[in-house]
Image (tube, grey):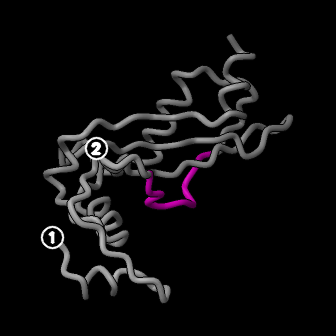
Amino acid sequence: MLSFARAAAAHASDVIVHLVGVAVVGLGAWSELARRDQRGMDVDVHEFAVLGDGRRLTLHRGRGFSTSATRLTAGQVESSVLTTVLPDDAEVTGEDHLWEWLASLIRNHGVAVTPEQLKAVPYVLEFGPRLSALLKSED
């Protein structure tokens, strides 16, 4: 468990938050259509953690992918999202996620978690409403 001082230091604001006994029950990547035109499309991707009390923590933003395709299938989007969030050296290391980095991002929110604990929770992919509508219109 994080000490009160460490939990407080993890937050840059003047608000002190100390979470006790909250577990991570899921991880995932959320993706949303950011741009689509005749040149292709951009899709934003961020990863999140789901806590046992139902809260959802955004772990990072600023990732995504671009394609010159003007049409995509759900399988193509899924593959591109996974390529975006998975480590570049996954085939070499055998690690399918950057577990230590994800755990540190969650700890920055005041939740005590280890990489081993994260490996045991489900990882899901979610498509935002604009991306979902695009994929439905492509069926």
Q: Position of residue 119 (x, y in %)?
A: 19, 45
Q: What amino acid is found at the position of numbered circle 1 in the picture?
A: Met
Which quadrant: the C terminus?
A: top right
Q: Is residue 65 left or right of residue 84?
A: right
- Front residue of this view, candidates 11 and 28: 11
User: Is 95 a magenta residue?
Assistant: no
Residue at 21% in and 60% down: 21
- Front residue of this view, candidates 103 and 89: 103
Indicate the secondary structure of the residue bearing disc 2. strand
Q: How many residues crowd mark 1 within 10 Å: few (<14), some (14–19), many (20+)?
A: some
Residue at 43% in and 39% down: 82
| 16 relative to 78, above or below | below
Q: How many residues crowd mark 2 within 10 Å: few (<14), some (14–19), many (20+)?
A: some
Q: Which residues are magenta?
A: 56-65
Q: Is residue 61 left or right of residue 1?
A: right
Residue at 54% in and 55% down: 63
Q: What amino acid is found at the position of numbered circle 2 in the picture?
A: Val
Q: Position of residue 137 (x, y in %)?
A: 75, 16
Q: Which mark is residue 88?
A: none
Q: Dividing the picture into quarters, in which one does residue 120 lie?
A: top left
Q: Which residue is mark 1?
A: 1
Residue at 51% in and 35% down: 126
Q: Which residue is mark 2?
A: 25
Between the C-alphas of marks 1 and 2, the distance is 17 Å
User: Is 63 a magenta residue?
Assistant: yes
Indicate the secondary structure of the residue bearing disc 1. loop
Q: Position of residue 80 (x, y in %)?
A: 51, 36
The reply to whether discs 1 and 2 touch (Cβ–Cβ < 8 Å) is no
Dominant secondary structure (helix, strand or loop) of the stretch shown in magenta:
strand
Q: Position of residue 73 (x, y in %)?
A: 61, 20
